[in-house]
Image: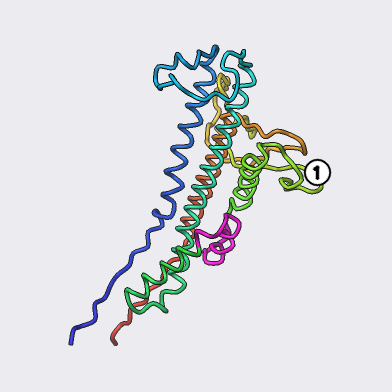
Amino acid sequence: MEEPTNIQVTLNPDGVFAPLLTILGQSSKNVLFGLQLIDSFDQPINPADIQSEDTFFTLHFDDPQKEQDIALSKENFKLFMLQKGFEDLIKGVNLTLIEAYYFTSLVAKRNNMKTFKDLQDEIGQLRKSAFKQHLPELLKKVTPGLSGSLLYESDIISLNKVRNCLVHRNGLVTEKDITDEITNQLQVEHSRMIMVCEKDGVEEEIEMFTMLSAGSSIRVKMVKETINFKLGDKIKFDFKQFNSLLTTCWLFGNDLAQKLPTIETTQETNK
């Protein structure tokens, strides 16, 4: 009779955070590159003169000889970048929440799994369930299994609201997007990393070309802020604001990874 084989399964909190980190890095580079292209673009060229692509025979949906409104084209491209950027952010958050869902569920059900097949079956069921959930549902599934409340949960919910508005309503704020019914506004909560100098108990944010007084102390801190959009407003962010939203997602993922459950083990002592 064969001896039963013990299988040790290691759950890595860093693996939960990893999908979000990867997407944040890609999104930041893509949006910054897009803004660089916009700033360097002054005059369109004829489609037939594009050297990087074969444009000999293409179907045009507008008159290619029509004079292009450069300012309008730049605004439309910025909107396109925001739509793609926010889709990436929420995709990254969702993937990290899915990993957290596996993690918390496996810890909670560890005593019910006696064989490797039990583990495989459980992971299969979790996978089917996780990919059917949207961000709000995933948060509800994950948070009960954490060691504490998520500090940036409301921030992420507001970013998901922005994503829905950009994707489904082309960035035009409607009643579906309102988060504050008293002011009828979409409030985007986020955290921003700033540098401050302090002297004689007075703090001042350090910006480019800020003159520092002798004897000032300098430190980095996080501040929570909101960006408000009214009904009928068009959602717009500059790169500095978008970078703060990236920072918020990073803070969320880091906080989530730190609050994943642990399994306490006890060792019996022979007396």
Residue at the spot 59% in from the left edge and 62% down from the top edge: 140
* Residue 140 part of the magenta-drawn span: yes
* Residue 155 part of the magenta-drawn span: no
x, y percent for residue 113: 39, 77
Classify 96 as above or below 33.
below
Classify 129 as above or below 241.
below
Residue at the spot 45% in from the left edge and 74% down from the top edge: 109
* Residue sitting nearer the eye, 96 or 152: 96
Amino acid identity at mark 1: Thr
> Which image quarter holds the C terminus?
bottom left
Q: How is the image coloured?
A: rainbow
Quick one: which residue is furthest to the left in this view? Answer: 1
Classify 126 as above or below 175.
below
- Quickly name the residue at label 1: 183
Secondary structure under the numbered disc 1 in the rendered image: loop
- Quadrant of the rendered image containing residue 149: bottom right
x, y percent for residue 162: 64, 42
Quick one: which residue is furthest to the right in this view? Answer: 182
Residue at the spot 37% in from the left edge and 72% down from the top edge: 119
Residue at the spot 58% in from the left edge and 27% down from the top edge: 77
Residue 241 left/right relative to 111: right
x, y percent for residue 20: 46, 47
Local packing at callout 1 (Cα closer than 10 Å; few below 14, some 14-19, many 20+) is: few
> Which image quarter holds the N terminus?
bottom left
Residue 90 left/right relative to 264: right
Classify 80 as above or below 8.
above
Residue 123 left/right relative to 150: left
x, y percent for residue 106: 43, 69
Count of all numbered marks drawn on residues in the image: 1
Which contiguous range is marked in magenta?
130-150
- Quadrant of the rendered image containing residue 208: top right
Residue 201 left/right relative to 243: right
